[in-house]
Image: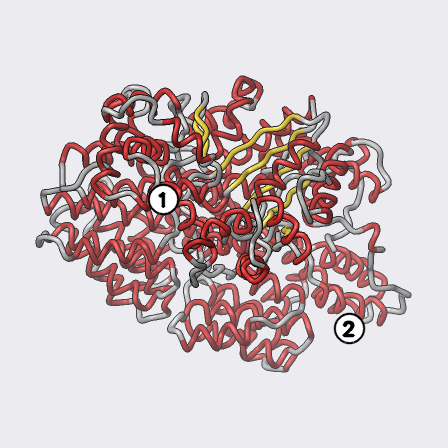
Amino acid sequence: MSDDLLGRRAEGEALDRLLTRAKSGSGQVLVLRGEAGIGKTALLDHVSARASGFRVTRAAGVEAESAFPYAGLHQLCVPFLDRLDKLPAPQREALGTAFGLTSGPRPTRFMVGLAVLTLLAEVADEQPLVCLVDDAQWLDSMSSAVLGFVARRLLAERIVLVFGLREGNDHLDGLPELLVRGLDDTDARALLDSVIKGPVDGRVRDRIVAEARGNPLALLELPREVADGLDAGPLTSRIEKAFVRQIEALPADTRLLMLTAAAEPLGDATLLWRAAGLLGLGADPAAAAVGTGLIEFGARVQFRHPLVRSAVYRSASTVDRQRVHRALADVTDPAIDPDRRAWHRAQGTAAPDEEVAADLENTASRAQARGGLLAAAAFLEQAAVLTPEPRLRASRELAAARAKRDAGALDAALRLLSAVEAGPPDERRSAEVEHLRGHIAFDRRRVGEAAPLLFSAARRLTPFDPDLARETHLEALSATIWAGAPLADAARTAPPPRTPPSAIDLVLEALSTRITSGYAASVPHMTRALEEVRALKVAAEDISRLPWLFGYRAGGIVATEMFDFETRHAFAQQQVRLARESDALVQLQFALNFLADNELMAGDPAAAQALIEEDRRISEVTGTPPVAYAVLLQAAHRGEDLATAVGAQARSEGQGRLAVIADWTLAILHNGLGRHDLARDAAARVVNSDALVYSCLATTELAEAASRTGDTGLVTEALERSSAWVDTDWSSGLKARLRALNGSPDGFRESIDFFARTGLRPELARGHLLYGEWLRREGQRVEARDHLRTAHEMLTSCGMPTFADRALGELQATGETARKRTAEPTDELTAQEYQIARLAREGFSNPEIGTRLFISPRTVEWHLRKVFGKLGVTSRRQLRDATFPLPG
């Protein structure tokens, strides 16, 4: 550790280790967390000084810049933008659009994050790279989100990423962290002695050391307060007060120059001096400021510490702040930087001004086009404040609320809606407010609250926008389905479809017919609806509205009722893609769960786990709870009971459909564990509820359990119920199984044949299990072993250990010596490795795998080396024939 940083040996050694590890090809991330003045910047300077052989890039959050999307990220990446052409086209387009260098579709934070990761990895391939980010608490939200994304994916890159952070930043929570504490008493006294000139009473010295609590900046600044006595109060504000005292002693023109510098977040000296000229400042106003050591004027203007900037700005009068912002707006080129000019104009405006408000609205549009939903909402909200006309003000507040909802800031959106409702009466706008309130209630899983809001909004919107009214009615019907409320009246009140009907019209008609007229009558309508949704081309303006149409609120229900797993899976993938493209994080949580549910039904537990984890990570960022529907099926497959508690809570909160899902997964759980009486009761509750989708799915669970408990009547009823189902490989496989359980053993073989033509590997495996069990009971041990062995292998790979144990027990009962399949810990693949190995086996290149999994190609290569070692292969060709152990 360098000698000039007193008392920081341990911190310096920890930072030095980051550099050593990164040189050897292991990406390193660290968050330095501590109060203002504690020495985080000095430690970042230490990293920079010790980074011999590294390329170093730096950025710093600035409080005034936190409204501008990607401002902090641009600082960090600007030295490397000459390499944009080396990025894959989608990444190049996303990053260019985010930085305002090119025009393109609105980029998502995921694609921007991947582009930044690829860009930094490209630089680090040539020379190890150090990225330092100071004052990360003031980064704009998009920069924070992207850098948090990148930080979690630095595995095999020669990159060190270190943040200095004063207080919480949700996007950086959970990263490796070093708490920077105050200096100990000895080092604090040594630092104090180095700055005190002349003798000081020992009691005063002791008090300064005690009050500073080891904070280096406090030790440097509090001695200035000695003459006036030391105040009580928070340490940060007392340090700031010490700076204010120095500022107040300066000439008026010097204070105004420093205020101009504080209000100009870029540190652009050219802009500063041009603004100073407009302000009519006297000769050389900078001299006195430089003499204080609080600020440096060069090619860039730099304050000694961020607290100096805030002290200068906060201590100035409102009139002076507005005067300075007006000058900065006047010298900012509207063609080059219209957004910053609009922001300065807004800060310099004392009263409502439509021209300024319109400028801010245009800035919001540009921010939204670049993917900055929260920034767009903030600009719109500010534009509303400056809008003199009340109706236009309410419209801008409503637009801001929509942007906040799309970004996952649900509480903030609701607060804005209250402001909208306080505006002048307007029936259409009032209906749109009710519509958005219904969306937010649905997002929060308050489905019983969402349904009446959405039905009311649909009725009120009909005279103004019939298409939106029908869409809203479908959303309301979906909310009613999820609430588990009576459906018939809701289905009958749908607005008439347009001519020709849209995809939304057809889905609404299909569900309404299913609810009011029964399964058989709805099949033609569901068939046509599926065809239309499959063929739907979603336009750019629809992306933020329609991801749910493909999900388990609408199209996914129809696909499952039609026993079309291929379409169901495709809809889930489409829903995830659209939610990502619109950056609608709350909708993405629902989409991830629907896709995870499909992956579990396809027998890919690793893919499902990755999606479930992403739902949890988004929850941490947005503050909304994880959707977590898929974990119920995941737990049931694993033999874990989450569903009992979830079902009880769902019933108490009026989430009827979630309670049904819980019972369905309980039936699966108990069938796997051989507790067939409990499985029978759980499945019967689902079947008797006649819930869309799940009453069909639970029918075979009920029949399997009832066949073991001797309730033959229930098995017969299940077979009769299935006669109405449309014929697909999925439904035919289930029907054949039901025939077998009713005493027609040929159905076992037919069921296996049907399921072999689907992607439903767990159902195929369970078909082998049931047939093997029947053969063993019939004394046909040799043939039984083949099916039970297959079932055991498949069920283990599908992540269904309790069903696999059932197969193992039956296999042992045939007289075969068999052991439970386990993998040594060293042979187990992680979930990430499993996904990469699967994609590599399918022929995807490292860059293609990286794009799918949002990691760099170098990280893919690093994982593949580990996969090869665990599987004992040396090439992708050998990987195609390898058997993957289930992720541990």
Residue 339: x and y, percent? Answer: 30, 30
| Residue 485 appearing in the image | yes
Indicate left or right for 98 with 814 as reference.
left
Q: CA distance from mark 2 to mark 1?
A: 63 Å
Tell me where residue 286 appears, x and y as whole percent.
37, 27
User: In what element is the residue under mark 1?
Assistant: helix
Residue 520 spot, x, y in % from top left: 38, 59
Q: Secondary structure at mark 2?
A: helix
Q: Position of residue 870 (x, y in %)?
A: 83, 44
Q: Which mark is residue 777?
A: 2
Circle 2: residue type: Arg
- Residue 329, compared with residue 743, is above or below; it is above
Counting other residues with Cα less than 10 Å from the Cα at mark 2, is it few (<14), some (14-19), or many (20 or more)?
Answer: some
Q: Which residue occupies 84% across, 72% down?
A: 813
Residue 753 seen in the figure: no
Q: Are marks 2 and 1 in contact (CB under 8 Å)?
A: no
Q: Quick check: 51 left or right of 516?
A: right
Q: Residue furthest front?
A: 199
Residue at left offset 20%, top offset 55%: 419
Residue 374 numbered mark, or none? 1
Res. 634 image quadrant: bottom right
Question: Vertically, is 656 above or below 248?
Answer: below
Q: Nearer the viewer, residue 635 or 561?
A: 635
Q: Is residue 317 left or right of residue 36?
A: left
Residue 133 lies in quadrant = top right
In front of the other: 386 or 800? 386
Quarter of the picture holding the C terminus: bottom right
- Which corner quadrant of the image does residue 582 belong to? top left
